[in-house]
Each structure stands twice: as structure tokens, then as C-alpha cells.
């Protein structure tokens, strides 16, 4: 079997269930791949690790960071996009009085300064709220400032922070999802290098096929998938993981992910995201999307392996 | 305080040594539990000790495995870091030019936040225990170098002259005089170093490892599992104290004399 | 007279030249390695590129540096004060040392980053949480070094002071503290670098400003040059602080 | 400590000269300034235990100049440390001052003590080392320095006020330590071999200094020396200690008239006293070399 | 250094006793073992400069026992340090051995040197401190220890082999340092006030030891002391140094027959030599106290 490795964007959790399931079920082995799954961590750039050749594949930040990486000259190609809609939302407590985008004016909003701030600005711009109309502040790991009322709006991933907030009693939050305002930031891109695509297309093909089988199996057998995840990291909270895989299913099985199959690459959506990033000055020059995203492998995977 | 009075069996002496620390720990534990219970501090802010211990118990085998792994990395990093630190301190003590040229670079190296370069560490040293050991090594050697250098230079020049009068070469002077003179100062750095090494190992585990206290730590941090966070803090504290104690015991056994 | 003129030359030759040479050698190896092994900039950018990026973003870097130095400086001062005070207390009351030291060691054995989330919860995302973290780390280094130094004087010297009717406080002021100075300065040296580092690391886990914050964002946005520029800025600043301390050391502990 | 009994028993028997017990008769009713009763000091434990001082009984009257001599390692410095309050005596005995028992350390700050080793502080120059005692007392630095500077020429240290200990010769260091002791003025002065590293003349000048202070301010002086001439020349009494475990072997009152002239050392009375004392010391010193096992027992 | 010229000039003129220049006549053709030519040593710079040794010229023949006396702080230890190779002499002069000039430090390891301060290592016990020189030489530890243990009783240290320096009395420390020097056997022995902290008998026993070694192995001994009796009793020659800046004031050959008995100190020849030398030293010592500004100049 050929050795390969996958670098995740974060520690083991249900967000990456498909890969662990594919490995546990022997799907990679069946494709002749001996895959090692390497977790990520804070300040660990999966893009850099794949680009440098330290890892063969990567589940990296998302469309915006992939484009930034390609823009910076990293020889990366995305072969699939996991989350078909923005996996995070801007949340507020019902008593904050924020019901529309216009209500953001004069409020304190916290978000991650890791790209999410552009999404927020773009979303608010659609509601006529400019940069100077609200107070923007960085959001750290902790949600306490939001829970304690120090900020009016916080940012939460649908699969992680939102569940944390729910478990801490905030079940009736008002959500502002960027997609509802025509802004989409697709996250969790599956990438490899241009060299790997060129030199080992069969490896890439096998990897993607097995991965998709894994995801399909995971979403169809969630309890078993969570069992597998709990083995990978026994320290996790099972309930939290169960909630996560549900949320992950929602963001993956959406748009083309629902109609065409998991991890589908939707060039229309990509173009829109690309233009927003360019408009915000995140990228300096346009990027050739056809070069940055290569749907050819995904196209070759039989529909029954990727469609739920 | 005649020595006669301080005597007693080994058991009594051990008791004497652990009595106060134990008392402090028990007091702190009671305070912790009491305050959190009485004032009903939210668990997300500061959970009671019992909750923390219960949480630790729920994952005890994983916690134990993680502690073992971190322990191994720490010890390896500490040993290599101390050895390298002492070596560099010696080199610097003997070569002013090397010291002047390289020492600033050592300082620069210590100002680099390793956690900004997780990817680099993995690219260079791979996904192995080696990258953790390297980071533990990296944070350990500096204080050891500084103190070794200082300790070696702090030697009484008249004693050096005495050794020279015996025809001792630099190597002999080093072995028999300078190094023993520097030992107490080096020992201070070793005590700092073992704590730093543990920290290095833990941070090293953030770079894509699958087991270790550091892995559990970020999991807990980012899921805001506060009781788990405290459980890991306790585990780190326990491991760190144990290692520190071992180093201190070595120090007390081998470096008991007072400088004059 | 003549000496002053000679001195500058000597200082340049003996102090500055080796450092410049050292830096030049390392820099040369660095550039050469990048060229020879065709190292990609996302693995390791060239020095010139890093300098370029630093210059490009200089205003932002300096603002960030200001925030970081404020946190590091305040934490350093606090940590030193607490470390020295605690060490003195432990010398005055040995029971405090036996009782407290293990707890202090335990507290310090936990990486500062592990407390950071708690500090963020307790003290907020602002500078207070960073200052607390720096204080903690610096305090321990200073405590261990100071304690060692304060205990250094031999029994006979302490007895001499006692024979003059000196109480513990006078012995502390006139014997233990001067005897401890070399040790304390040692601690100060090691701690100054750590202070900046801890401030940066704490900032990476949540902040409004600072070098660590810049580095964190840059990492997330795959802006590797900016990461290195941040590191360079921090290093230069730490280096300056360290040299300042070497100078203080000379002034303070000249008798060794 | 098995062998200690032999030498303790010897003390009263072998003492052919006037014993300590008869001395206070001169003072009459008043209790002596200082009285040591059955003083012991043991170091270490078990087989390695060293009995440094055993069963020392000694009375010292106000204004007396007492010289202590004895073989090297017999416990003189240890005795001084106990009298100065620096070392707690073993529980067996007690130290009385003006007839009242003193707690451990009660004498600290009440005597001028010069230890055997100079113990100068490396970070203080000559003047600042000399004024250490004054500083501890609370004398303003400027005033203390002025006094020390005035004293420097008398100690042959003029021109060296800004030098640091490592730049001094052995004898110079000793003189700085001596200055430090004299500047710290107390009614009782304990000097542990203060002139050991000095040449004859410097020593003579220092002796003159000491006698002057002693006579002018009626200080009480306890003085350890190895130089028997010095002991007889200076002392009202010379106390000889036995070899370790050190106890009082004999206590000789020196009846030579004062002021004593340097020429006195050749007088027959002097030579007779010296002969007797030398005999006593040599008998003891010999023990350290012969029955050496008694040393650490 | 303006005032140094006065005392340098004085050296030949005021020396009423046989000068160093005449001494080698006894040895005949052979160059002396050690010859110091115009040796200088200055410490510090500018106004604070101290001239410790100035224009010292001295010849020492093989097998000679030379005692060096002089007022405290006159530069004796400095001279020793230069001879032992521990301190480079100023460029003015040179040190010749067997007529050949020696480079700085060439004598290291070739002389047994006992410094004024005992310099015992705190982490070594008595035996291990004593064998330090042997260890440096490469003698196996066990053999070295055996030799030291054998020597212990002679030095009155039996029973203390396992003690550490802080557990010793001042005189005991000095004896350990002495043992360390004797165990490191070399043809030339430099002793800097080796018996300063010892009582009369212990000192006499140590002197006997030293003379025994000297006579048996024809060692060359250079010996600093403050005790003029000791100097005359031990030495073939007594060299008197002037006060700082130290140079040779006079160089007296002691013609007393050997072996010398302790009783010799009362002989008229002895007393006459002593009177002469004391006069010379006192004249010098007085200078440190009178023209003190000349000290640091
Ligand atoms: N801290 C100690 N631990 C063990 N033994 C000690 C200690 N201090 C002193 N001694 C022992 O006590 C004895 C007496 O020592 P002390 O210093 O009183 O002698 P001394 O009479 O002053 O001798 P010297 O004339 O040589 O100075 C010595 O045998 C010494 O080894
Ligand atoms: N490192 C130094 N720096 C400055 N001056 C020094 C230094 N070492 C010695 N001296 C000076 O040199 C002079 C001679 O010192 P040295 O130790 O040779 O005297 P000595 O004759 O041995 O005196 P003693 O009999 O007191 O030991 C002294 O005035 C001393 O202050
Ligand atoms: C776009 C985006 N930016 C920052 C974070 C914050 N963050 C960094 S790592 C981590 C754990 C991943 O689940 C979290 C919460 C995020 N989640 N998503
Ligand atoms: Mg003594
Ligand atoms: Mg000397």
C-alpha cells in the first residue's frame, strides 16, 4: 500500500468523522493507501504542511484561506469542498433587540479575525451597515464575554460553539447566517499539491473515493461514526460530538452537496466568494479558480459513493 | 539547633519534609471546594474541586496515558537541553569571542515564539516524539546556559591560581574547581529547566499530536470544558511538582555545600 | 583622555563586531540554504523578504509592539516585585517556603497557555490577562533565582551581622540582598526574554492588539511573511531589552 | 563522648596556678560581668560527634582583659561564638551576665566581636566594610564614614579607603576587620586572633590601640591568641584551654604592673609566667598529636 | 609613582648587613636556582595605582631555605605569586631559573605553593582537599588518599578525615592547606605564612616537619612569616622587604649551625641577629603608618 497522510485543520472531532470512518472501515486500504491522519492545532497551518510536502493531503481552512494560499504562491489544488454553506453564524440573545442587520448599528460585535470579519462586513454591507456603524472586536476562544453580555453579537460555528452555547442554556439565540444574505463562505477544503495531482493521480483518486465513502458511511451510521471518533480521542464529550455530526451533516448536505454529492465543487459559488475577497483586498490579484480547484477527481467518483 | 535534636527515623524525616506542603495542599483543597460551593461559583467560571476530580476520574486511563507520554517528552527534552545548555555555558565561559558572537543569537532564539512555527517544527522534525523533545529542549537550554556561564566565571581567581600552581591544565581546573563551584548556580537553572521543559513538551504536543497532556489541554480549552481544563491543570501541576522535587532531591544530595 | 577615544573603538571591536559577525554568518547560512535547497517561502522565507515585510508593515508592527511591550514590561515589573518579595518572605519564614514552594512549583508547572483561557475568562481579553500571565512566569524565575541568592551567604557572615545586633531585616538589606544580586540579575536576564515571549503567546489565544495577535491572524490567513515580520520585530525588541539588562548587570554586580 | 571525662577531670587537678574560683575574691560582693557555668558544645551526631567545648566554667569581671590560649582546634572560637550569642550552647550549662542567665542570642549586638576569618564583604570597599557595624546600629553613613576615614591612618590603611577586599593583602584585610570591630563600640570586646596576620610592628601598634581603648573606656576584653608573649603582655589573666574537648586547664592572673613596657618581655617574672603557661599549653597541644582518637570521639 | 624612588634608593644604602650580591660567592660557578632581576608589579591605573613590588633583585641557590619578612602589605604575597607563576610580573624585569629566563607561568606545577588564604574547597573533605595536588598530578585517588591518611596524625587531624572545611577550626584549615602543599612534592616550596594560625607547639611540630623534608630531600624553601624568631630559626637567609612599594631592604645570611635547637633563640648570636632585623623591619613598618600617602601613589 502507498503511504500517505492527511493533515486536519484541528484536533479529532466529529467535524472530521468521514476520514476516521474511512480509515477504520478500511476504505483507504481498499484503494491501496496506507493513510495516517494527523491532527491540527492552534497556529498550525495545514496549507503550509501540505504545500511543503510534509503531508500529502489536507483538510484546510476553507475557500478563503485556500485562495489566499494560492494567491501567495503555494502549489495547492482543492479536490473537494466540504461545507457547502457558511458553517458559522452571528448570534445574539433574543433580548438584545437585534432583529435585522440594521439593528447591528451601534452594537458590539465580536468575531474571529481569521477571515470571518470579512464575511461579517460583507453581510452587514448588504443591509446598509458600514464599517464605522458598529464596534467590531476580536473574539477569543472563550464565549464568556458574550454569555456575560459584554458583547451583543458573537460568532459561532454551527457545529461547535453553537452547541456549546446551547449546553450553557442559550437555546433561543437569534442567528444571522451569511447565506441568508447572499454571502457564502465555504469552509473545510480538501487539498493536495499540484505535484501530487500530476504525479500520482491514482493516489488522489483513491483517496477521494475512499474519503467520500467514509463520509457517506459516517452520515448514514452516525452512532458508529461517533464510536470511532471517541476511540480516536477518548477525552471528548460524546454528546457534544453527536450534536456536532448533526450540524456537520447540515452544512455538508446543502446546495450542491445535497444535489450532486458530498464535497462537490460549486464554481458559481466559488466565483462569488472570490469576488468578495478581492473587493475586500484580502487578495491582491484575481486567482484562476480552474487552477485552484480541480473537480476532475470528484467527477470520477461514482454517484452512489458520494450521494446520501 | 544541635543536629541531635533534628534526628529521627527516615519515616519521621519524610513526614517532616512533607508535613507543611501537605498541609498547604489540604488547606487549598478545602478552600477551593468551600468557596466554590458556598458562593455557588458557576462551573464554567471556576468549578468545585470535586467536580474536577470526578471529571478526571471519568477519563483516568486516557489521562494517565497522556501524562506518561508528556513525562517521557519532558524528561528527554530536559536531559538533552541541560546537557546542551551546560555545554554552551562552558564554551562561552572559555571563549569570550564565541560568547560575544553567539550569545546574542541564543537570546534571539529565545524570543521566537515556537508556537508560531508549529508547521516548521513538523516539516523539520516530523510527526514524531522528536519534535516535542526538540521544543522542550529548546526552552530548557537557555537558562542552563546563562547560569552555567555565570557560575563558571564566578570562581575565586585565587583558587584558580592555586590549581595552576599544581600544574593543573584548564581541563583539570574545570573538572575539579570551576564546575563544582558553578554547580549550585547550575542547579537553580535545572530546577527552572525542568518546569520549562514540561511546558515545552506540552506546547509541542499542540503540533498535531494525538496523545499527551497538551492535546487534552487544547481540546479542553477550545471546547471550554472548564472542569476538564482544571483536571489537566492539576495533572500538569502534579507532574511538574514531582519532576521538580526529583531535581531538587538530586541537588540536595550532590550539592549540599555553601559557597564561601 | 586618550582612553575615551580608544574605548569606542574597543567596544566596537570587542562587543559589536562579534555580534555583527555572528548575525552575518547565520544570515549568510540562512540565505545560502534557501538558495541552495530551493526552500519555498512558505517553509522559510529569505531574510531580505522578512525585512521587506517588516518595513512594509512597520507602523502596524510598532503599534503592536507597543501593546506587547506594555504588557511584558508591566508583567515583568510585577513579577520581579512579587518574586523578590516572596523570596524574602521565604527567607524570613522558612515555614512559608516549605509550605508554599511546592504549590508555587505546581502552579508554574502548568504552561501559561493553559491558564490563558482562564485568565481570559477572569480578566478579559484586554492587557490584564497578558500581564497576569507574564507576572506568573517572570515571578517564578525571579523567585527561584532570588531565593538561591539570598541563601548564599555563609553562616559565618550572617553571624558577623548578628554580632552587630542586626536583625533579619538588616541582615537581609546589608548582606543577603547584595550577595543575591548576581543571582537576581541572572533571573532578570532569563526572565526578560520570557516576559516578551509569554506576552506574545498569550496574545495568540485572544487579544485586541499586540505582536502575538498579529502573528495569530497572519497564520490563520496564511500570510507567512507577516508571521516572520512579527517574530523579527519581537526579537529585536527582546534583544534590546536584554542588552539593557546586561548593562544594568555590569553596573550592579561589578565586584564579581 | 567517652574520652571527655579524662580531660575534664584533669582540669582542676593539673592546674598548679590560681584557679578561676579564687579570682572573684578581688571583686568582692558584685556578681561578675560574665559567668560561664558548665558550658558544653557538641557538633554532629553519633560516632562522628565532636565535642568542641566541655564543662567550661569561667568568670569575667567588668573591665578585665582576659586572654584565651590553647592548642589549635581546642574550641576557643566555639567558646567565643557561644559567648557572643552566635551559637547556642548545649542545654547542659548557662551563660550569666551580671548574675542573670542569658537566653540564646541575648548578647547579640551587645559585644564587639571580631571573628577569626575577616569576613569582609566583597561588594564593600575598605571604608564601607569598616562602618558595617555602625550602619547596622543606625549611624548615618556620612558620619560613620567620617569616623572611619579618621581612623584609617592609625591602621596603616590610608590611601586604601576605596579599595575592595580582593585588592588587599592578608594583613590589610585583618586590619579592616579590626577597624570594623573597634568602630562598633561596646563594653565587651571579643577578639579572635585579631593580629595573626600582622608583622611585629604593626601588631605592636594595634596592641597599643587596643590597650588605649581598653584603659580609656574601661572595656572588658576577651582575646584569643596563639602568641603567649602577647597574651601575657596584654592580659590581666591568661586562661589556658585543654586540647579538644576544650575545657579550662588553668587560669593565671598576671600581676605585672601597668602600663607595661615592651621591654617587660625580658623580665624574669615575665619569663617565669611564660615558662609555666607554655608548659601547660604544650602538654595539651601534644595530646592532639598523640591520643588523636580522643579528638573526634 | 613619584615616591617609590626614595625607598628603592634606600635599599642598598641602608643595608648594613651582607647584601644579596655577596651571597652567591659560596655557590661558586653554578648559576643560582632562581634569580629575580628588577622585578616590578603595579596594580591599577592612574592615580589609584598601587606599586606592590618594585625593583626586586634576589638570588636563591638550590637547597636554600630563605625567609621573607616585611611589614604587612609590603608585597610579599605578590612577589610569591610572581615567583610561583600565578601573576605575570610587569615587563620591566625577569625571572631566571638555572640562569634561563622563564616565560610567564612557566613555573606552574614546578613548585609547591601554599597561598596565604587556605583556599580549601567547600565540597571536599579533609582528605580530599589534601590530595588535590596529587590528583592534579594524576596519582590514583586511592593511593593519594592512603598517603594523606598516613600523614593525618602528624598534622593533628586524625579523626577529622571525613570533616568538611566549614567544620574545622582556623588552625585546622591551615594545617589541611599545609598537608596539601607537602603532599605535592616539588623541589621548590613556597609557603606564605603557613603557621600564622597555629599555637606554639603545633607550630613547632610543623616546623620540624618542614625542616625534616627540607633536609632529607634538599628542597629549596621560600618562606613568608611575620615571626622574626621563626624566620631566624628556620632560615639560611632572612630577606627583609621594605614597606610598599616593596623592594629588598636587606638580606641577612644566618650563620647559626644546624640542626638548630629550640633553645637557640636565647643565644646571644640569635638575639643580635634578631635585634638587627627587627630594627630594619620596624623602620619599614613605621613608614606605612607615617608617610601613608606613599602607599597608594
Ligand atoms: N560546624 C561544625 N561542625 C563540626 N565540628 C565543628 C564545627 N565547628 C567547629 N567544629 C569543631 O570544633 C572544634 C573546635 O573548633 P574551634 O574553631 O572552636 O577551635 P579553635 O580553638 O578556635 O582552633 P584554632 O585555634 O585552630 O582556631 C574543632 O575540632 C572543629 O573541628
Ligand atoms: N589585585 C590587586 N589590586 C590592587 N592592589 C593589590 C592587588 N593585590 C595586592 N594589591 C596591593 O599590593 C600590596 C601588596 O600586597 P601583598 O598581598 O603582596 O602584601 P603582603 O606583603 O603579602 O602583606 P601581608 O603580610 O599583609 O599579607 C598591597 O598594598 C595590596 O593592596
Ligand atoms: C473561521 C474560524 N475562525 C476561528 C475559529 C476559532 N477557532 C480556531 S480553532 C477552533 C476550533 C475549531 O473547531 C476555533 C473555534 C473558528 N472556529 N473558525
Ligand atoms: Mg579559632
Ligand atoms: Mg600576604
Image: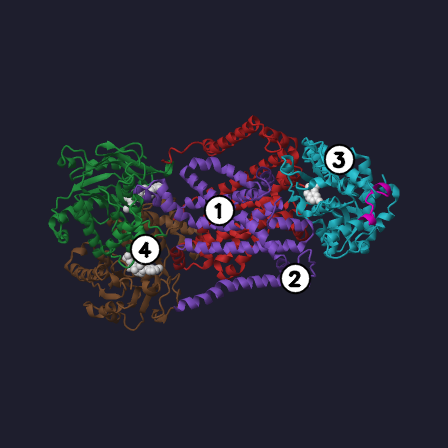
Chain colours: A cyan, B red, C purple, D green, E brown
Q: What subunit carries mark 2? A: C
Q: Tell me which residue sits at (22%, 69%) in the image.
A: E10
Position of residue A154 measured from the top left corner of the image (x, y, whole percent): 68, 39
| Distance CA(mark 4)–CA(mark 2) | 57 Å
Q: Residues within 10 Å of mark 1 (few under 14, many from 20)?
A: some
Q: Is residue D294 left or right of residue C191?
A: left
Res. A226 mark: 3
Q: Quadrant of residue D279?
A: top left
Q: Residue beneath label 4, please?
A: E116
Image height of E251 relative to C124, above or below: below
Mark 1 vs mark 2: give the one in front: 1
Q: Which residues lie in the magenta part? A: A257-269
| Near-viewer residue (C223 or E211) | C223
Res D155 visible: yes
Q: Quadrant of the C terminus of chain A?
A: top right
Task: Name which of mark 1 and mark 2 comes first in the sequence.
Answer: 2
| Residue placed under numbered mark 1 in the picture | C77
Picture coordinates of residue D239, whole percent (x, y): 21, 42
Q: Secondary structure at mark 2?
A: helix
Q: Is mark 4 within 8 Å of ligand 5?
A: yes
Contact flag, marks 1 and 2 (Cβ < 8 Å): no
Of discs 3 and 1, which sits in the foreground? Answer: 1
Amino acid at each position: 500500500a502507498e503511504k500517505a497522510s492527511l493533515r486536519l485543520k484541528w484536533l479529532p472531532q466529529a467535524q472530521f468523522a468521514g476520514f476516521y470512518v474511512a480509515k477504520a472501515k478500511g476504505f483507504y486500504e481498499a484503494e491501496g493507501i496506507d493513510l495516517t491522519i494527523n491532527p491540527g492545532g492552534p497556529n498550525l497551518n495545514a496549507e503550509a504542511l501540505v504545500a511543503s510536502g510534509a503531508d500529502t493531503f489536507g483538510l484546510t481552512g476553507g475557500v478563503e484561506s485556500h485562495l489566499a494560499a494560492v494567491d501567495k504562491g503555494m502549489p495547492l489544488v482543492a479536490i473537494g469542498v466540504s461545507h457547502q454553506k457558511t458553517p458559522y453564524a452571528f448570534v445574539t440573545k433574543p433580548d438584545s433587540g437585534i432583529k435585522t442587520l440594521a439593528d447591528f448599528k451601534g452594537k458590539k460585535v465580536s468575531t474571529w479575525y481569521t477571515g470571518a470579519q470579512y464575511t461579517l462586513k460583507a453581510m452587514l454591507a448588504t443591509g446598509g451597515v458600514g464599517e464605522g456603524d458598529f464596534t467590531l472586536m476580536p473574539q477569543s476562544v472563550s464565549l464568556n464575554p458574550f454569555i456575560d453580555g459584554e458583547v451583543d453579537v458573537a460568532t459561532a460555528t454551527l457545529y461547535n460553539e453553537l452547541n456549546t452555547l446551547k449546553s450553557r442554556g442559550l437555546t433561543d439565540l437569534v442567528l444571522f447566517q451569511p447565506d441568508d444574505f447572499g454571502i457564502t463562505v465555504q469552509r473545510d477544503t480538501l487539498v493536495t499539491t499540484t505535484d501530487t495531482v500530476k504525479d500520482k493521480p491514482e493516489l488522489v483518486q483513491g483517496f477521494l473515493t475512499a474519503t467520500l465513502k467514509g463520509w457517506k458511511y459516517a452520515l448514514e451510521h452516525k452512532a458508529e461514526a461517533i464510536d470511532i471518533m471517541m476511540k480516536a480521542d477518548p477525552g471528548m464529550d460524546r454528546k457534544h460530538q453527536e450534536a456536532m455530526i448533526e450540524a456537520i451533516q447540515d452544512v455538508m448536505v446543502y446546495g450542491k452537496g445535497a444535489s450532486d454529492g458530498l464535497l462537490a465543487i460549486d464554481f458559481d459559488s466559488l466565483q462569488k466568494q472570490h469576488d468578495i475577497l478581492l473587493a475586500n483586498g484580502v487578495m491582491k490579484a484575481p486567482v484562476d479558480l480552474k487552477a485552484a480547484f480541480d473537480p476532475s477527481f470528484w467527477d470520477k467518483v461514482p454517484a452512489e459513493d458520494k450521494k446520501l | 539547633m544541635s543536629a541531635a535534636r533534628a534526628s529521627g527515623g527516615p519515616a519521621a524525616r519524610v513526614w517532616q519534609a512533607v508535613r507543611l506542603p501537605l498541609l498547604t495542599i489540604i488547606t487549598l483543597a478545602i478552600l477551593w471546594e468551600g468557596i466554590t460551593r458556598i458562593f455557588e461559583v458557576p462551573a464554567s467560571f471556576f468549578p468545585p474541586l470535586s467536580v474536577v476530580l470526578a471529571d478526571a476520574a471519568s477519563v483516568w486511563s486516557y489521562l494517565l496515558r497522556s501524562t506518561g507520554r508528556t513525562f517521557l517528552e519532558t524528561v528527554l527534552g530536559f536531559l538533552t537541553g541541560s546537557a546542551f545548555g551546560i555545554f554552551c555555558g562552558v564554551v562561552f565561559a572559555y571563549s569570550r569571542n564565541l560568547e560575544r558572537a553567539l550569545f546574542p543569537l541564543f537570546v534571539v532564539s529565545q524570543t521566537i515564539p515556537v508556537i508560531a512555527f508549529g508547521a516548521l517544527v513538523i516539516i523539520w522534525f516530523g510527526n514524531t516524539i522528536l519534535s516535542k523533545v526538540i521544543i522542550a529542549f529548546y526552552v530548557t537550554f537557555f537558562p542552563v546556559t546563562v547560569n552555567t556561564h555565570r557560575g563558571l566565571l564566578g570562581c575565586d581567581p585565587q583558587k584558580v591560581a592555586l590549581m595552576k600552581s599544581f600544574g593543573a591544565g584548564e581541563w583539570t581546573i574545570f573538572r575539579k574547581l570551576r564546575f563544582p563551584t558553578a554547580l549550585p548556580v547550575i542547579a537553580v537553572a535545572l530546577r527552572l529547566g525542568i518546569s520549562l521543559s514540561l511546558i515545552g513538551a506540552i506546547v509541542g504536543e499542540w503540533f498535531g499530536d494525538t496523545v499527551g497532556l497538551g492535546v487534552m489541554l487544547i481540546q479542553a480549552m477550545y471546547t471550554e470544558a472548564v472542569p476538564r481544563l482544571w483536571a489537566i491543570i492539576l495533572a500538569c501541576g502534579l507532574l511538574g511538582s514531582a519532576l521538580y522535587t526529583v531535581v531538587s532531591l538530586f541537588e540536595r544530595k550532590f550539592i549540599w555545600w555553601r559557597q564561601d | 583622555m586618550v582612553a575615551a577615544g580608544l574605548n569606542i573603538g574597543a567596544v566596537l571591536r570587542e562587543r559589536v563586531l562579534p555580534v555583527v559577525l555572528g548575525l552575518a554568518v547565520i544570515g549568510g547560512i540562512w540565505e545560502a540554504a534557501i538558495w541552495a535547497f530551493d526552500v519555498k517561502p512558505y517553509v522559510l522565507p529569505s531574510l531580505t523578504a522578512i525585512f521587506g515585510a517588516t518595513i512594509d508593515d512597520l507602523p502596524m508592527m510598532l503599534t503592536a509592539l507597543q501593546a506587547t511591550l506594555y504588557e511584558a514590561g508591566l508583567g515583568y515589573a510585577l513579577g520581579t516585585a512579587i518574586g523578590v518579595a516572596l523570596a524574602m518572605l521565604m527567607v524570613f519564614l522558612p515555614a512559608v517556603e516549605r509550605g508554599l514552594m511546592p504549590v508555587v512549583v505546581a502552579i508554574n508547572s502548568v504552561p501559561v497557555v493553559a491558564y490563558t483561557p482562564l485568565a481570559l475568562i477572569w480578566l478579559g481579553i484586554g492587557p490584564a490577562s497578558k500581564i497576569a500571565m507574564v507576572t506568573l512566569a517572570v515571578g517564578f524565575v525571579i523567585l527561584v533565582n532570588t531565593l538561591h541568592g539570598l541563601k548564599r551567604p555563609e553562616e559565618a557572615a550572617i553571624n558577623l551581622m548578628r554580632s552587630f545586633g542586626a536583625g533579619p531585616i538588616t541582615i537581609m538589606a546589608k548582606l543577603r540582598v547584595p550577595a543575591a544580586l548576581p543571582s537576581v540579575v541572572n533571573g532578570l536576564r532569563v526572565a526578560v526574554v520570557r516576559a516578551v515571549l509569554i506576552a506574545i503567546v498569550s496574545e495568540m489565544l485572544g487579544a485586541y492588539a499586540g505582536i502575538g495577535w498579529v502573528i495569530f491572524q497572519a497564520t490563520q490567513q496564511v500570510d507567512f511573511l507577516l508571521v516572520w515580520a512579527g517574530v523579527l520585530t519581537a526579537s529585536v525588541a527582546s534583544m534590546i531589552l536584554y542588552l539593557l539588562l546586561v548593562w544594568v548587570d555590569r553596573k550592579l554586580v561589578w565586584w564579581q | 563522648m567517652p574520652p571527655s571525662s579524662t580531660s575534664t577531670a584533669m582540669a582542676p587537678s593539673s592546674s598548679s596556678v590560681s584557679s578561676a574560683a579564687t579570682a572573684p575574691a578581688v571583686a568582692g560582693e558584685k556578681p561578675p560581668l560574665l559567668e560561664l557555668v558548665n558550658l558544653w558544645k557538641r557538633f554532629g551526631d553519633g560516632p562522628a560527634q565532636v565535642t568542641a567545648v566541655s564543662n567550661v566554667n569561667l568568670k569575667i569581671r567588668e573591665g578585665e582583659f582576659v586572654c584565651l590560649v590553647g592548642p589549635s582546634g581546642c574550641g576557643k572560637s566555639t567558646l567565643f561564638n557561644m559567648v557572643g550569642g552566635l551559637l547556642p550552647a548545649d542545654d547542659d550549662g548557662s551563660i550569666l551576665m551580671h548574675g542573670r542567665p542569658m537566653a540564646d542570642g541575648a548578647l547579640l549586638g551587645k559585644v564587639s566581636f571580631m571573628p577569626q576569618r575577616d569576613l569582609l564583604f566583597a561588594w564593600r570597599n575598605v571604608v564601607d566594610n569598616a562602618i558595617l557595624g555602625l550602619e547596622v546600629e543606625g549611624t548615618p553613613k556620612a558620619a560613620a564614614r567620617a569616623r572611619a576615614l579618621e581612623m584609617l591612618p592609625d591602621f596603616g590603611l590610608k590611601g586604601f579607603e576605596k579599595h575592595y577586599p580582593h585588592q588587599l593583602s592578608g594583613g590589610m584585610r585583618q586590619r579592616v576587620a579590626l577597624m570594623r570591630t573597634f568602630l562598633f563600640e561596646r563594653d565587651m570586646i571579643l577578639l579572635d586572633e585579631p593580629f595573626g596576620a600582622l608583622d611585629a610592628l604593626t601588631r605592636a601598634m594595634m596592641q597599643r590601640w587596643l590597650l588605649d581603648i581598653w584603659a580609656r573606656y574601661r572595656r572588658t576584653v576577651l582575646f584569643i591568641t596563639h602568641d603567649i608573649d602577647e597574651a601575657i603582655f596584654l592580659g590581666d589573666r591568661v586562661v589556658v584551654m585543654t586540647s579538644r574537648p576544650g575545657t579550662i586547664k588553668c587560669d593565671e592572673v598576671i600581676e605585672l604592673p601597668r602600663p607595661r613596657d615592651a621591654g617587660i618581655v625580658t623580665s624574669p617574672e615575665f619569663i617565669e609566667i611564660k615558662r609555666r603557661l607554655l608548659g601547660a599549653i604544650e602538654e595539651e597541644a601534644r595530646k592532639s598529636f598523640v591520643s588523636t582518637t580522643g579528638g573526634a570521639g
